[in-house]
Amino acid sequence: MGLKHTNAVLGGALVGGVVLLALVGLVYTPHDPLEGDLLARFAPPSAEYWLGTDEFGRDVLSRLMAGAGVSVAVSVFSVLLALLLGTTIGVTAGYAGGWVDRGIMVLVESLMAFPGLLLALGIMTVLGPSKWGVVLALGLAYSPSVSRIARGAALSLRQRDFVIASRATGHGGLWTVCRHVLPNCLPPLLIFATSIFGSALLAESALSFLGLGVPPPLATWGGMLSESRNAMDQAIWLAVFPGAMISLSLLGINLLGDAVRDLLDPRMRGVMA
């Protein structure tokens, strides 16, 4: 229990730190993250520029703070969209059963044959780089996995006594789903949401790194990594700091996700680790 508690605290601290950095970055940054000073190009970390500057003389710390807001916002909205779409589709399939279930799951299983990032890449190739395009692409890419979780939960609930009793008393399907099925689907969906949140953060960074994500001049951690490729020999900090932020964020999300899983479903301890 001691190690699990420590991991939960560490995960919460890391995620909380990233969220705090994102919130502070919305109202304050040491320097303008978009404004450069060509006289301060590739300045190393110092009292004025704590994490150095990039090739345009832009403050790396300020861009990390601004990028935290973009990355967190895109990931959160992507997960919310995936939960909305996936839960609606999965619960509909699981509760309705029959040909509705079979038809929906053929489509879902077909989409799940492709990795989420690959689906997002295909969608962004069509949509072009934009912040809300990334949200849409990632939300659509991860919704099939959510659908499968929601369907499984709905299938196990549709024959439970309280659901059968609700139908027997004359309540319609929509009322029964909203009152009895959806609330009982939440624990596995919340557990899964922590997993896809980390995946969405990493995918957003990958898309920005490839030039298919949030377009410049907005700062993103993946975009900063991409910009650092041509300056690795003279400004290693340009890759180290955004890379560290991505790594620490993913570590925190995974640790916190394990804690949420253990809290909501103790039977799954050690199964999904």
Image: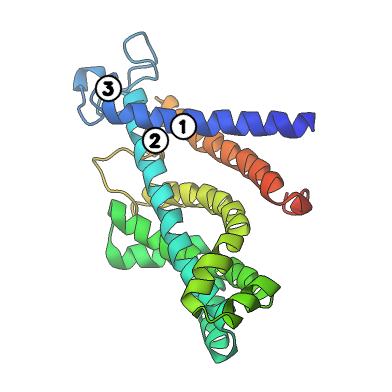
Q: Which of marks 1 and 3 is in front?
A: 1
The residues tagged by marks 2 and 3 sit, at their Cα atoms, a distance apart of 23 Å
Q: Could you say whether the residue bearing mark 1 is in a helix, strand or loop?
A: helix
| Label 1 vs 3, first from the N-terminus | 1
Q: Can residue 120 be seen in this snapshot?
A: no
Q: Callout 3: helix, strand or loop?
A: loop
User: Where residue 98 appears, x then y in whole percent?
Assistant: 59, 90
* Category of crowding for the residue at label 3, using alpha-carbon neighbours closer than 10 angstroms: few (below 14), some (14–19), many (at least 20): some
Residue 156: mark in rendering: none
Q: Do the residues labelled 1 and 3 touch (CB within 8 Å)?
A: no
Give the structural element (helix, strand or loop) at label 2.
helix
Q: In which quarter of the image is the N terminus?
A: top right
Q: Mark 3 points at which residue?
A: 41
In the image, what residue type sits under mark 1? Val
Q: Which mark is residue 68?
A: 2
Please, what is the three-letter code of the amino acid marked with disc 3? Answer: Arg
Query: Mark 1 and mark 3: span between their CA atoms?
Result: 27 Å
Residue marked by disc 1: 18
